[in-house]
Image: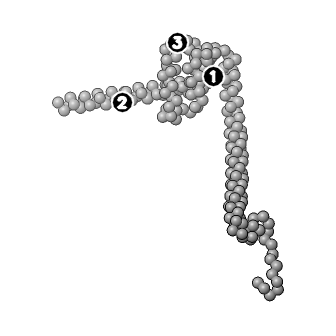
Amino acid sequence: RNTEDNSKGDVRKRMEVASLNENLKRFTIELEFVQSLSNPKFLYEIKVFCKEVAFINYLKYLMYWKRPEYAKFLANPICLTFLTMMQDETFRNCLGDPKMIDNIYFKQANFILHYDANRQREATYLQQLEQEEKLRQAENTAMEDESNGVAAGGVEAASAIGNGDDAAHQTVHSPPRKRHHPEGAE
């Protein structure tokens, strides 16, 4: 009986390993297929399958690759853009046009060629925007401080003038005047 339990356990383990191997194989095949969608020449070659319902359903099924837990395995994430575009019948129908394929290839090459320069230009632009925003904030703060200071001084002056305090009136509207006192009297 003990031997029988061991053999059942071995069979179960072998089935689990086989299942894991099948899942890994399927994962790898689907990963390679999705990544291949970033190659315009590959898109041109698979155009013959684009009319088949099974292939269209397979493309829909592959949309799970857009989820972050799967997308992190992609070496070339632009393939997700093409996977999404492959969901559109009009796009699939255009894959037979060599000019369109060349256009896609050119745009990809241009993007890659200018990627660093574009990122640098974007970074410089963002830095300029941040500096302008800081300047605006500083100007607004200065204007608020100035208007709060004048308003506070104005309120104090108005209440002092209402009380007949001439000194408060002098500090708001003009520099303080020297008071002339007769000699010896202060």
Q: Residue 139: where, in percent of width, then height?
A: 72, 53
Q: Residue 124: where, in percent of width, then height?
A: 71, 44
Tell me the mark number nearer the camera, choosing from 1 and 3.
3
Q: Residue 46: where, in percent of width, then height?
A: 57, 17
- Near-viewer residue (31 or 141): 141
| Residue at left offset 56%, top offset 14% | 50
User: Considering the numbered disc 2 on the image, is that residue within a helix, a strand or a loop?
Assistant: helix
- Image mark for residue 17: 2
Q: Which residue is mark 3?
A: 52
Under mark 1, the amino acid is Pro
Looking at the image, is 169 positioned above or below residue 105? below
- Near-viewer residue (183 or 149): 183
Q: CB atoms at circles 3 and 2 under 8 Å apart?
A: no
- Near-viewer residue (118 or 186): 186
Q: Which residue is mark 1?
A: 40
Q: Residue 63: where, in percent of width, then height?
A: 51, 25
Q: CB atoms at circles 1 and 3 under 8 Å apart?
A: no
Quadrant of image for the N terminus: top left
Tell me the mark number nearer the camera, choosing from 1 and 2.
1
Instruction: For residue 29, say whether it is visible.
Output: yes
Instruction: For residue 131, say whether it is visible.
Output: no
3D distance between C-alphas at marks 1 and 3: 20 Å
User: Considering the numbered disc 3 on the image, is that residue within a helix, a strand or a loop?
Assistant: loop
Residue that extends furthest to the bottom in the rendered view of this protein: 184
| Left or right: residue 140 compared with residue 183 | left
